[in-house]
Amino acid sequence: MQRFSAIIAFLMTRLGVNIDHVATIRQARGGVEPEPVAAAILAETAWADGIVCHLREDRRHIQDRDLELLRKIITTHLNLEMAAVNEMVKIASKIHPNLVTLVPERREELTTEGGLEVVKQKSRLKKVIKTLHENDIEVSIFIDPDTEQIEAAGEIGADIIEIHTGMYANSLTRNKMENERKKIINATLFAKKIGLKVSAGHGLNYKNVQGIASIKEIEELNIGHSIISRAVFVGMEKAVAEMKRLINEA
Ligand code: PXP
């Protein structure tokens, strides 16, 4: 029975809960609450499969001490989103998250706006990936559903790609949304064919998640804003559990 449950768990799409916006609320007052580490513990209690946080260069939400505490406290899987810059590579090499997700970063953006441009910076990114691998850290690249970019990610040694679902999530019509979903399916199948694991995320919420969770080749969904927004009203554990249920039912 235990073995059977383990196989089912292995086949199900995993949920990584991004807790950045708990830190956003804390930073609004520059105080000590709400505590993002407490949010991570509650997310794990509700069966989140991993915790995601983005240490931005401007430290607008997650702080260095959050990352250090998360590494010590969480019991699932820590995914650190970061820019591919020396400062962040040094921090990751010291903290040892299970996974680093390389993302583009612009200071003035409200959130990560697009996938990383891989084709034009292959040699620089290859060095970053090599250093992270030497530190036993898996590397994912946040990427648009674009085969040229995905192929480049494979060539420079990425282990995983996380497909940017923002265009799908922000589609205003059903047709547009279906077209974006098809692009994500094609990108996923291409990535699997060249030996990459596939995750997806950005803009996913309780209404649109099943369109992506039903793509079985996608192994993990990383979701933040919608879960934290719901948690404000129903609590963190319930918000995570509801999202897990939708993903499992898709
Ligand atoms: N994946 C990546 C790489 C991201 O940068 C973000 C936003 O921090 C997310 C997933 C989560 O996006 P959202 O907060 O819209 O769920």
Image (tube, rainbow, N blue to C red):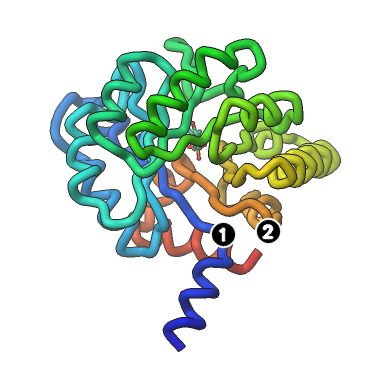
- Dot 2 crowding, Cα within 10 Å, few <14, some 14–19, many 20+: some
Please name the residue shown 64% across and 27% down the image.
155
**Label 1: how many Cα within 10 Å (few below 14, some 14–19, many 20+):** many
Quick one: 203 or 139, which is closer to the camera?
A: 139
Q: Which mark is residue 168?
A: none
Image quadrant in which you'd find residue 193: top right
| Residue 37 vertical position relative to residue 87 in the rendered view, above or below | below
Q: Position of residue 152 (x, y in %)?
A: 66, 25
Considering depth in this image, is 117 or 155 the residue closer to the camera?
155
Q: Provide the residue designation for mark 2.
A: 216
State the CA–CA distance, disc 2 to disc 1. 7 Å
Question: Can you say which quadrant of the picture contains the C terminus?
Answer: bottom right
Element at label 2: loop
Question: Do we see residue 21 in this rendering?
Answer: no
Q: Is residue 232 above or below residue 241?
A: above
Q: Amino acid at mark 2?
A: Lys
> Which of the labelled discs sits on residue 13, or is there none?
1
Q: Could you tell whether 213 is left or right of 187 in the image?
A: left
Label 1 secondary element: loop
The image position of residue 153, as x and y in percent, is: 62, 28
Q: Nearer the viewer, residue 151 or 144?
A: 151
> Is residue 188 placed above or below 94 in the rendered structure?
below
x, y percentage for residue 186? 79, 42
In the image, what residue occupies the spot 63% across and 37% down? 163
